[in-house]
Image (spheres, rainbow, N blue to C red):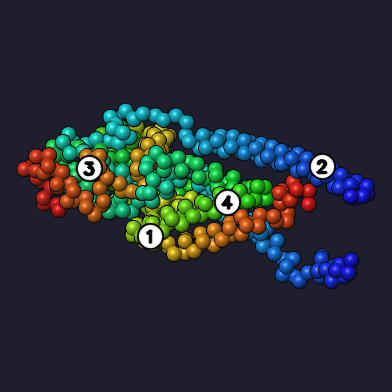
């Protein structure tokens, strides 16, 4: 057992600081995403018909489907947010989070491409813009790409400190 | 394989099984807690949602068509959805209210105006869109929807302000000859739930912003409205008596 002599120092304690910080990147991703989802969902929840209108403003989905998405999206957002906050089923919650971001990016990009002037509806606005406001599609997409990235990190590395997942595994 | 090694392996298997069982148990606990949170939260959320939705929808005494008020009996159906808080509705009103009224009087069109409330978030929590819409229903009950609506647009508050109070709405009504019945109707907000219900129906029907106009059931872009209206009137064969020419 001569090898342990060279391996032992690389175990705990002597790891470089950045290496020990890596798992906490996942925690930050979780908390940021959780905050965004819970706020986005909670703002839409009190007025679901407004949420339906926001979905319809994109003119991408047929009326029936748009209603279903408009009513269903806010509860789903809150659920994903709570799961990420607790760190329960992190990989699956992050996957749903990422898929939603992809859908939003497609929606905003297509509204941009079609020259439509709508609010993204992201945080509980009813789709249409007030007079004099111009849409900020670029920043909306950039933000969603950032959130997509955070989701992707969690899909790839779902094991993070301070999570229910970790308690389940008994670590 | 030595005895000691076998024992070590057996112990490892047992430990792995115990760990697996603990994982299973803890997964069940976590799922149970999560499900309980979802169910309780969902119930509370649904309760709040139902509570927010004003309970009884009072039907106006005036005749209504699909949560709107009719004027004229012409062959061309023009559906107009307005929110009294919406600046472009005001602009539309200023541009088209007169020609539309004339076309309705001349028997060319049937104008159906739907008061909707989609900009309640623009009035700092006073729900001006709903209150103004409900007041317009009170006016409609006394046959003065058109006059009141014009007066209300003229008095339109800026977005991100509380808007007109109920008392001020009553004053606007007085300006077009509405009296005490109207006042108590506005103050009681008798038709607030009706306006919200109409907004919900319109939203599910494709309304995503105001003003929203349909000619013979087909949504029309605002910039094309004038030409589309003329075309529809001509197609209906009632273009001969065109008093709206002066206004275009």
Q: CA distance from mark 2 to mark 3?
A: 71 Å
Q: CA distance from mark 4 to mark 1?
A: 26 Å
Q: Residue at x 86, y 47 (%)?
A: B9
* Callout 1: SS: helix
| Residue A82 located left or right of residue B9 | left
Q: Are marks 1 and 2 on the same chain?
A: no
Crowding at label 4, few (<14), some or many (≥20) Cα neighbours within 10 Å? some
| Residue bearing mark 2 | B18
Specify whether disc 3 shares its chain with disc 4.
no
Which of these two is toward me, A75 or B152? Answer: A75
User: What's the CA distance linking mark 4 and mark 2?
Assistant: 30 Å
* Mark 4, residue position: A95
The residue under the point 29% across, 31% down is: B64
Whether residue B165 is visible, yes or no, is no
Q: Chain of mark 2?
A: B
Question: Residue A168, percent across and down?
Answer: 74, 46
Find residue B215 and name its label: 3
The quarter of the picture where residue B87 lies is: bottom left
Tell me, for residue A112, which label it has, or none: 1
Residue B1, image x, y percentages: 89, 50
Look at the numbered discs 1 and 2 and tell me whether their residues touch, using CB distance below 8 Å. no
Q: With A9 as the anchor, is A155 left or right in this view?
A: left
The Cα atoms of the two marked residues, 3 and 4, are separated by 44 Å
Looking at the rendered image, the disc whose residue lies closer to the viewer, 3 or 1, is 1
């Amino acid at each position: 057992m001569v090898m342990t002599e060279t391996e032992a120092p690389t175990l705990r304690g002597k790891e470089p600081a950045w290496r020990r910080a890596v798992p906490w990147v996942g925690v930050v991703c979780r908390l940021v995403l959780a905050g965004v989802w819970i706020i986005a969902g909670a703002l839409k929840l009190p007025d679901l018909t407004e949420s339906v209108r926001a979905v319809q403003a994109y003119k991408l989905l047929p009326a029936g489907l748009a209603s279903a998405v408009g009513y269903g999206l806010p509860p789903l957002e809150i659920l994903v947010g709570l799961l990420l906050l607790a760190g329960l089923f992190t990989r699956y919650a992050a996957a749903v989070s990422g898929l939603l971001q992809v859908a939003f990016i497609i929606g905003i990009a297509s509204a941009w491409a079609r020259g439509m002037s709508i609010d993204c509806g992201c945080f509980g606005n009813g789709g249409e813009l007030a007079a004099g406001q111009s849409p900020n599609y670029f920043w909306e997409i950039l933000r969603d790409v950032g959130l997509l990235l955070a989701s992707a990190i969690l899909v790839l590395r779902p094991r993070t400190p301070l999570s229910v997942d970790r308690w389940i595994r008994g670590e | 394989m030595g005895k000691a090694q076998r024992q070590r392996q057996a112990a490892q298997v047992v430990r792995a099984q115990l760990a697996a069982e603990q994982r299973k148990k803890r997964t069940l606990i976590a799922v149970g807690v999560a499900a309980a949170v979802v169910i309780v939260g969902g119930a509370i959320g649904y309760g709040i949602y139902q509570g927010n939705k004003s309970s009884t929808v009072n039907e106006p005494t005036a005749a209504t068509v699909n949560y709107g008020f009719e004027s004229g009996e012409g062959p061309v159906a023009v559906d107009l959805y307005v929110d009294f808080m919406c600046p472009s509705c005001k602009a539309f009103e200023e541009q088209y209210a007169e020609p539309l009224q004339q076309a309705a009087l001349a028997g060319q069109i049937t104008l159906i105006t739907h008061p909707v409330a989609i900009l309640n978030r623009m009035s700092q929590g006073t729900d001006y869109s709903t209150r103004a819409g409900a007041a317009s229903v009170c006016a409609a009950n006394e046959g003065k929807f058109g006059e009141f609506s014009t007066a209300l647009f003229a008095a339109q508050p800026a977005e991100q302000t509380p808007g007109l109070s109920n008392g001020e709405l009553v004053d606007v009504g007085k300006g077009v000859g509405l009296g005490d019945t109207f006042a108590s109707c506005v103050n009681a907000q008798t038709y607030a739930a009706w306006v919200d219900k109409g907004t919900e129906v319109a939203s599910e029907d494709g309304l995503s912003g105001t003003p929203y106009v349909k000619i013979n059931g087909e949504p029309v872009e605002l910039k094309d409205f004038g030409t589309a209206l003329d075309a529809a009137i001509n197609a209906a064969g009632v273009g001969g008596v065109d008093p709206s020419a002066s206004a275009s």
